[in-house]
Every structure is written in structure tokens, then in C-alpha cells.
Amino acid sequence: MENRSDIKISGSGNIGNGIYNDIKISGSGRASGDIDAIRVHVSGSGQFQNVRAEEMHISGSSHIDGNLTGGSFHVSGSAHISGIIELDSLHISGSLHAHSGVRARTIRASGSISVTNDIECEEMKAAGAVHTDGLLNADTLEISLSGNCKIGEIGGCTIRISAPEYSPNFFSRLFSHARSRTLTCNTIEANDISIENTIAKSVHGKNVIIGKGCKIDSVEYTDTISIDPDAEVGGYVKI
């Protein structure tokens, strides 16, 4: 049976490579090698190499210079990860910058997620900012636009991009530019597609709804199509 120890850093300290039960950092901690832990919690700042953890929570700031693998990863602070991310679940209410690909079963994002390469998941629900240069591939994708998003390509089974109306409160009047919420994408391909405030070169789907605020160069569909009067579509064809 593995002999796992606990480590707690409230000032500053180093973490040796090895296997751990709990790692808690409320000060400044640096890992000198790869770690395998049950739980990692950072409310200060953490610097890691490769990390495998069943649960990892970041409410401060952390840099992972290698890969992150394991169960769940929660970010309410900021995290920068250089290597591949492979997880069961990813929750972002702060900011995540990933310089390689992301693979997860589920992704929940109410903050911002920026990925240099591809994002692959079974289900993703986002209400913040999503930026990726590559492909976002999800069986089910729901993005509620609260700002501008930019995605290279989108693929999946069910895609829903919505732009909820802002209530006319003080902050929405003060920051009127925030009402400009747009998803920019090269191509979108899925079985069922419903999009609003989306700018894309091409859309390919079985059942397609082009909603308000969309600017699409071309649409190909196989079963049904609906185009809002407010949308701009260069052309569409049933195939």
C-alpha cells in the first residue's frame, strides 16, 4: 500500500517529488519534481512540474510547467499550465491559460479559458470567455455569451450559442460596451445547431437555427433550417 504523507505550507517552502495525501499551500510553494496527490489546495501561489491529483483547487495563482492529469480541477484564481490537461472534470470561475490541449469529460466555465490547442470533452457549459486557436469538440456544447469568444473550429452533436439580454441596470448602462458579445469561429459542424451573435465562415448541420445577431457566409443543412430576420446569411443549401 502506498505511503502517502501530508504537507502544509503557510510561509514559503519546497515540495519534493513523490506521492502525497494532502498538499495545502497558503503561502508560496514550489515543487522540485513530479507529484502524485489525493488533494492539492492552493490559496497562495504554487509552482509545479507534472501533477497528478484526484482533486486540485486553485483559489490563488499557480503555474504548472508540465502536464496536469487526474480527477477534478477547480480554478477560482488563476492557473497557467504548459503541458497537456487530462481530467474527469474541469471547473473555471477564475482564469485558465493552457498552452497545450485540454481533454476532460465535463467542463464548466464561468470565468475565462484560453487554450492554444484543441479542447475535447463530452459536455461543456460556459458563461464566460472562451478562446482557443484549435478545435473545440464536444458532444454537447452550451455557451452563454457574456463577452467576446474566439474559437478556431467547433464540432460535436449538439451546439447551442446564446446571447441573453442584459437587464437595464446601472452597470449595463455604465459599461455599454459589454453588451457587444460575439462568438467568432471559422466553421461549426454538428447535428443540432442553434446559434446567436455568431460570426462564422461556414455552418454544417442536420437541424440548424441561425438566430439574432449572426453573420454567416454559408450554411449547409440536411433536415431543417430557421434563419432569424436579424441574421445575415450569405447563402444556404440543403444537401
Image: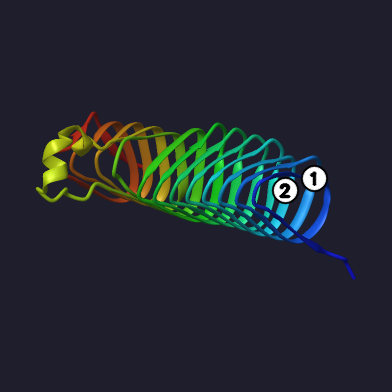
Query: Residue placed farthest to the right in the image?
Result: 1
Figure quadrant of the C terminus? top left
Q: Secondary structure at mark 1?
A: loop
- Determine contact: label 2, label 1, CB under 8 Å: yes
Q: What is the basis of the colouring in this image?
A: rainbow
Query: Residue placed farthest to the front in the image?
Result: 11
Residue 229 appearing in the image: no
At label 1, which amino acid type do we have? Asp
Which x, y percent locates residue 160?
A: 34, 51
136 displayed left or right of 229: right
Residue 6 appearing in the image: yes
Identified at 73% across, 53% down, the residue is: 52
Q: Secondary structure at mark 2?
A: strand
Query: In the rendering, which numbered label is found on residue 34?
Result: 1
Q: Residues within 10 Å of mark 2 (few under 14, many from 20)?
A: many
- Say which quarter of the image contains residue 20: bottom right
Q: Which residue is under mark 2?
A: 51
At label 2, which amino acid type do we have? Val
61 displayed left or right of 217: right
- Disc nearer the start of the sequence (2/1): 1
